[in-house]
Amino acid sequence: MPEPTINLFSLDRIAMESFFHGMGEKRFRVNQLLQWVYQRNMTDFRKMTDLSKGLRERLNRNTNLDLPEIVRQQQSGDGTVKWLLRLQDRNCIEMVYIPETGRGTLCVSSQVGCGLNCTFCATAQQGFNRNLNVDEIISQVWIANHVLEKTKIREPDIASHGGPDRRRPVTNVVMMGMGEPLLNFENVVSAMKLMMDDFSFGLSRRRVTLSTAGMVPFIDRLRQECPVSLAVSLHAPNDELRNKLVPLNKKYPIHRLLESCTSYAGERNRQRITFEYVMLKDVNDSPAQARQLSTVLAGVPAKVNLIPFNTFPGTRFEGSDMNAIHRFREVLMSRNILTITRKTRGDDIDAACGQLAGDFLDRTHRSRRMRQHPVVFP
Ligand code: SAH
């Protein structure tokens, strides 16, 4: 019986070392292989010329480097690129690239759909299908780098900024695509370790951010196993309201969530936790709620990210107007909480926060927009 073929994208360094050890290969071969695959975009074993011929043949026989297929690529007027990827089981996921001066951020999905049911999020409407495997997570970064390098769709000055993190189009990863990353803990951690491996993408911990709706036990585990930058989707200053917006709050209420955030930050030399707060008109955007939020966050090393609500068909929410957002921010700032209003990017292609749906539902305007921004795929 031939050995079953294993997808090498599914192995982090530890797993790959043990795989190579099992083949009687030296450990440094892992570095070579990682460099070929992740740094030189090579998926043809036969061309990995510094590996022995025998090893190349065995890899060719027993392993593969299969990738999800790009079904669609859309570019927004503001440079944001969204891809729809088809997995082997024909499920689809989305990922989004956001170019900014000096950096390029890839928003990566961790699940097909999402089971958390946050009431203001488009992904929730799709329901939960399954967790992504390690290869399906890491290959999002691989594909984005590869396509962007080939097509030169990126800010021209990213390359000139020096530093090992910054040479590739993807300089930052945020686990803020579809899904709740902490509910796919093992696979997400393995993939993030690969993102940070010096022989792979070599991103520093600061440049990898995981966003969670508040899976408290896993925040504690993440601190121990892979302390990347942490973002928390808070969205409300009290449990009563948060229970309605983020139903997970009924299980892990705000005080427990903030306790685990504080200990997370402590381990990281008081590295601030980012709290995401989507601004919903007449729901969570009053000055009184801003004051309540500042009280709740007192003592937590916090940074607040106010996110303008991105609308989607069928939602009952409306976004706060700019004045309300401005006032809310002023209150927080006056109480010494660093607060940033996030710019909405890619909303003309439904690529903004909470708009990822990852299916083929034709929302009428979507096909029109695709024609507006056709992208020729290499
Ligand atoms: N499940 C994780 C990862 C998803 S991150 C989490 O909840 O953090 C996606 C971010 O976009 C979250 O902060 C989410 O609350 C926010 N979001 C969801 N729907 C949105 C919408 N319609 N407009 C703006 N932000 C939204």
Image (tube, rainbow, N blue to C red):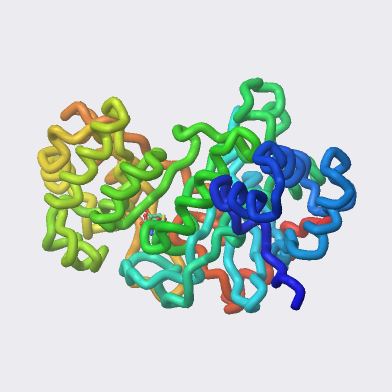
Residue 170, percent from left and from top: 63, 40
Which residue: 58% across, 45% down?
13
| Camera-side residue of 372 and 263 | 263
- Give whichever of 40, 208 is nearer the camera: 40
Residue at 37% across / 72% down in the picture? 115
Q: Farthest residue toward the front? A: 24
Q: In which quarter of the image is the N terminus?
A: bottom right
Ligand 1 rendered quadrant: bottom left
Residue occupying the point 75% across, 64% down = 62
Could you say where residue 288 lies in the image, as x and y percent from the top left? 12, 46
Q: Is residue 155 left or right of residue 92?
A: right
Q: In which quarter of the image is the C terminus?
A: bottom right
User: 40 above or below 361?
Assistant: above
Picture quarter containing residue 29?
Answer: top right
Pick whichever, 126 or 281, lies toward us.
126
Q: Position of residue 313 (x, y in %)?
A: 46, 73
Can residue 191 be seen in this snapshot? yes
Residue drawn at 16 percent across, 29 percent down: 335
Describe residue 98's horizontal placement relative to residue 270 as left or right.
right
Q: x, y percentage for residue 354?
A: 44, 60
Question: Taking the image as drawn, is residue 107 in sight?
Answer: no
Image-quadrant location for residue 351: bottom right
Q: Quadrant of residue 291?
A: top left
Number of on-image labels: 0
In this rendering, position of residue 42 left or right of residue 106: right
